[in-house]
Amino acid sequence: MQIFIVMKKKGFLGLILVSILLFSCSETVVIENRPDQSPTAPPISGYFKKRVLIEDYTGTWCGNCTRVSYAIEQAKEQSDKIVAVAIHNGNDPFHFAGIAPLKNLILPNSPLALPVSRLNRLNIWSTPEHANVQQAVDFTSNNSTVGLAMNSTLANGTVSLDVSAKFLDDYSNLKLVVYLLEDHLIYFQRNYTSFYNGVNPILDYEHNHVLRQSLTNILGEDITGTTSGSTFSRNFTFPVPANIANADNISFVAFLVGADNKAINARESHINENQQFEINP
């Protein structure tokens, strides 16, 4: 009789356990019912385009850095989801004085020996980069649960920029990074590669997406309102920085990083451009 009672208890507990497992499996199916974010997956209605951020640590004096810039051009030809930033360092007219926090993030115990490039901030782009373009493309997708959009105006020497992010999932511990870049800067470039016809130096090289200023803390600033269905917005209003050669060539890059400091989505925008969220129809 005593054994029977124990068995009944075990059976009852077993039923409870099975129920819990079934419930958990049901919940797991819901939680894992995420869109396919592989780069070749077809777009699913309602989700956002996902771009990869390429941060290119470079210099006009760096003859091997053209290897990365060429790879970025190849990546852009292969995918429309490439967001590039050129972070110049050293004896360079485009030297970015605030590079130290980024250097300490990506190479905390090593010198910054150029060329260096990172995908979504912390992923090493394997060398030679031009032979590993697919590695960058693999970080892109048609289906993301967070989207970005920017709207900007330039009037009387003042820039007004609105950055917005929309969430289809619950996120936490996110940070926003916003860069101000400049395009179409003509200056010589050392070139020790066979790219660009092997010319060295390239006297009239066009430097694009050059980082001129970080409008946020360069490692990101905490944001709130990142739960499913929410939209976050922030405005930046400021005079055109003194180091900008031509305000008409200003562009922006905004991206969100997680607690691991890796970018989860990024977007670029030109001055006086009004963007909508890239939502799949």
Image: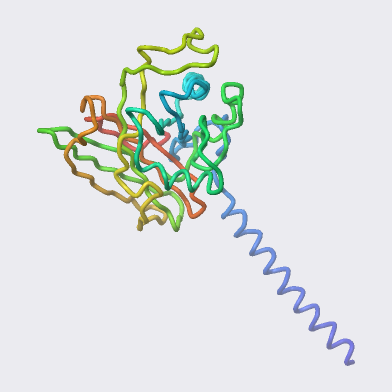
Q: Is residue 123 left or right of residue 102?
A: right
Residue 191 in the figure: left or right of residue 206: right
When the figure is inspected, residue 71 is found, relative to residue 53, above or below; the finding is above
Give the x, y percent position of residue 276: 31, 36
* Figure check: 105 above or below 156: below
Residue sitting nearer the eye, 40 or 67: 67
Residue 66 appearing in the image:
yes
Asked if residue 51 can be seen in this view, the reply is no
Residue appearing at x 48%, y 35% in the figure: 52
Q: Outermost residue, left direction?
A: 156
Residue depicted at 43% across the width and 13% down the height: 201
Label count reads 0
Relative vertical location of residue 105 with respect to residue 135 in this rendering, above or below: below
Instruction: Using residue 208 as the reference point, say whether residue 25 is left or right of it.
Output: right
| Residue at x 35%, y 55% (from the top left corner) | 223
Q: Quadrant of the C terminus?
A: top left
Q: Estimate the x, y position of residue 133 in percent, counting from the top left.
A: 57, 25
Question: Residue 248 or 114: which is nearer the viewer?
Answer: 114
Quadrant the N terminus occupies = bottom right
Residue 2 lies left or right of residue 27; in this view the side is: right
Identify the residue at the far bottom of this view. 2
Task: Pinpoint residue 79: horizontal percent, then vertical percent.
Answer: 49, 24
Q: How is the image coloured?
A: rainbow
In the image, 29 versus 8, the foreground residue is 29
Instruction: Please tell me whether residue 245 is drawn above or below residue 264 in the rendered image.
Output: above
